[in-house]
Image: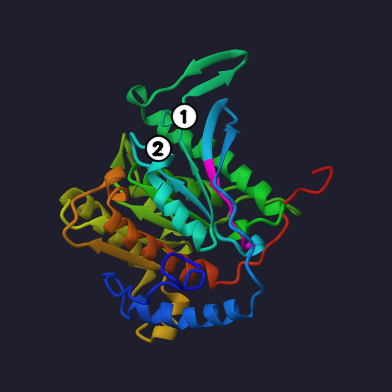
Amino acid sequence: MSRFGRGWLCGSPSFDRFVFAAATIGSMIGLAAIASRAKAADDPVEKKIPAPEDIDLETSDGLQMQATFYGSNQGKNAVPVIMLHAWKGSRADFAGLALDLQARGCAVIVPDLRGHGKSTTIKRGGETSTIEQPTMRKGDIEAMVTYDLEAVKTYLMDRNNAGELNIEKLCVVGNEMGATVAINWAIYDWHWAQLPTVKQGQDVKALVLISPPMNFQGINIAASLNQPLLQTGLSVLLIAGKKNSKAMEDAKHINSSLIRLRGKPPTDPQEAADRQDLFFDAIDGISLQGANILNDKTILARLDLDVAQFIELRLTNKKFPWTNRKPALGQ
């Protein structure tokens, strides 16, 4: 049971605040929730939710990376969620949201990205060096995409092959800097060359972008927004505070870019529940952004419900069959 007293990912049907929605998400979630509650009633007693686990990861460039994994009790049905913190933030910023989504059945991993939290040591060729946030540049942010997230994905792939989650339903939540990393890594994940017998990448199916900047540390996402994958291939939830003019301006620009090829959603609630894949929550009266937006209990409760309903609508209720992705011997 979730902290809202309902079945797994069956939150309150009130998503009508999204500005790009012909039919309210509340109606769509209400329809989806009926099926989810009926299924839950037939299920046996759920397994105990695992305790959060601090884990050590190592990137291919030698970063000794720290992360926390919030395991699921849903096995192969679990939606995996990667949460990426803001500039000057750490995995601790997402502790509340991670626990909430774990209680709803998700398998959540929250890393300290390089130069942040406890991910500051690089071991390479017998030598040890330190990377710290104040000295980081554009190349370090790019390394989060090519190295840090790949190490996180490898860990989740092992959990998938153990039957503890379904990597085919991967969702990435990024806050500020984390949103920049999330967008670029989703594209990176979908550009792996496909082998005859082994699927590589193409697992990210949904993005939640909190206060996403158009330009961060010299990385402009304009070109990324023109990628066909972001235009039509992924489900996207945008969240920003209305009182922060810069954050709202950037979020609106991203929303407009993504609308161009997606078109307006259907007006019929049932059809919209099946097809609508772009949502924008502009939070009234809020100027908080970055790590601060996750520290306000009222906002956190709203984010929790927003993200949970989005995951149910676009991942839980969609058919992404679990597969064992362990390469065969000799590959």
Q: Residue furthest right?
A: 329
Whether the magenta-drawn stretch holds residue 71 is answered as yes
On screen, residue 308 versus residue 150, left or right, reads left
- Residue with the mark numbered 2: 90
Q: Residue at x 58, y 76 (%)?
A: 40
Q: Residue at x 29, y 46 (%)?
A: 213
Q: Which residues are magenta?
A: 68-74
The image position of residue 235, as x and y in percent, is 44, 64
Q: Quadrant of the C terminus?
A: top right
Describe the colour scheme in one phrase.
Answer: rainbow
SS for tag 2? loop
Q: Residue at x 55, y 72 (%)?
A: 318
Specify few, some or many for label 2: CA neighbours under 10 Å numbering under 14, 14-19, or 20 or more: many
- Residue with the mark numbered 1: 118
Vertical arrangement, residue 136 with respect to residue 294, above or below: above
Q: Residue at x 67, y 63 (%)?
A: 322
Q: What kind of residue is marked 1?
A: Lys
The image position of residue 56, as x and y in percent, is 58, 33
Specify few, some or many for label 1: CA neighbours under 10 Å numbering under 14, 14-19, or 20 or more: some
Quadrant assignment, res 114? top left
| In-front residue for pair 266/292 | 292
The image position of residue 243, as x and y in percent, is 15, 54
Whether the magenta-drawn stretch holds residue 70 is answered as yes
SS for tag 1? loop
CB contact under 8 Å: marks 1 and 2? yes
Q: What kind of residue is marked 2?
A: Ser
